[in-house]
Amino acid sequence: GDSVTQMEGPVTLSEEAFLTINCTYTATGYPSLFWYVQYPGEGLQLLLKATKADDKGSNKGFEATYRKETTSFHLEKGSVQVSDSAVYFCALNQAGTALIFGKGTTLSVSS
Amino acid sequence: NAGVTQTPKFQVLKTGQSMTLQCAQDMNHEYMSWYRQDPGMGLRLIHYSVGAGITDQGEVPNGYNVSRSTTEDFPLRLLSAAPSQTSVYFCASSYTGQGGSYTFGSGTRLTVV
């Protein structure tokens, strides 16, 4: 079945550092890809998405590009802030089903 | 708009008890789904629905039951609670399947003792 694999955390960075969180997927068709973020004690919020190959999703300084050839959707940010500390989830879905999530990556940013 | 509303926010059950976690959305979304979140496991899909009257199983359906009699509501029933069902449960909805952005509820924290 379809699946998503994320890099293990936690990821610990200093403020203004560059962030990459790796995400790869396995799917039989052409899924849509998402990054969701969960701040402490809260539910999940959509961060960005891409619906077809070579699409780039972006929001709040975060970016991810849908790479069909490497089945990847890595999340990047050029300069992280303390307020970016959260758990980040990569996910996919295909027509007629629901979101399938990776296990999540905890990001901790210190000042 | 209220979005996706889950009730209750917290619940403690005894082993063997049954209960229903409520999920309601006011966005006229066709797609709804239930997840459980456990440490180190991410979010695992329990059941989902692509419209009223249509439901299907996800990755971890055992011990849970769902029905979708209206577009707005998608309750999750625990038939006989077990300590292994201690978790945080999230409901989500989307206006469409592939490509649609899911909106999540704030979760229900369930403890089974």
Image (spheres, coloured by chain):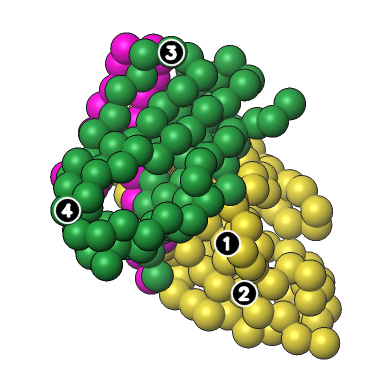
Callout 3: chain: B
Q: Report how far apart the C-alphas of labels 3 and 2 lie in the structure.
A: 39 Å
Callout 2–callout 1 Cβ contact below 8 Å? yes
Chain in green, by letter, is B
Callout 2: chain: A
Q: Is residue B113 above or below residue B80?
A: below
Span shown in magenta? B40-62
Q: Name the residue under label 2.
A: A107
Q: Name the residue under label 1.
A: A88
- Residue type for callout 4: Gly
| Residue B107, percent from left and from top | 52, 50
Q: Magenta span has B52? A: yes
Residue B89 seen in the current view: yes
Callout 1: chain: A
Callout 4: chain: B
| Residue A56, percent from left and from top | 67, 43
Q: In this view, does B4 lie above or below A109?
A: above
Q: Mark 4 points at which residue?
A: B16
- Is label 3 or label 2 in front? 3
- Tag 2: Cα neighbours inside 10 Å, few (<14), some, or many (≥20)? some
Which shade is chain A? yellow
Numbered mark located on residue B92 in the image: none
Q: Mark 3 points at which residue?
A: B70
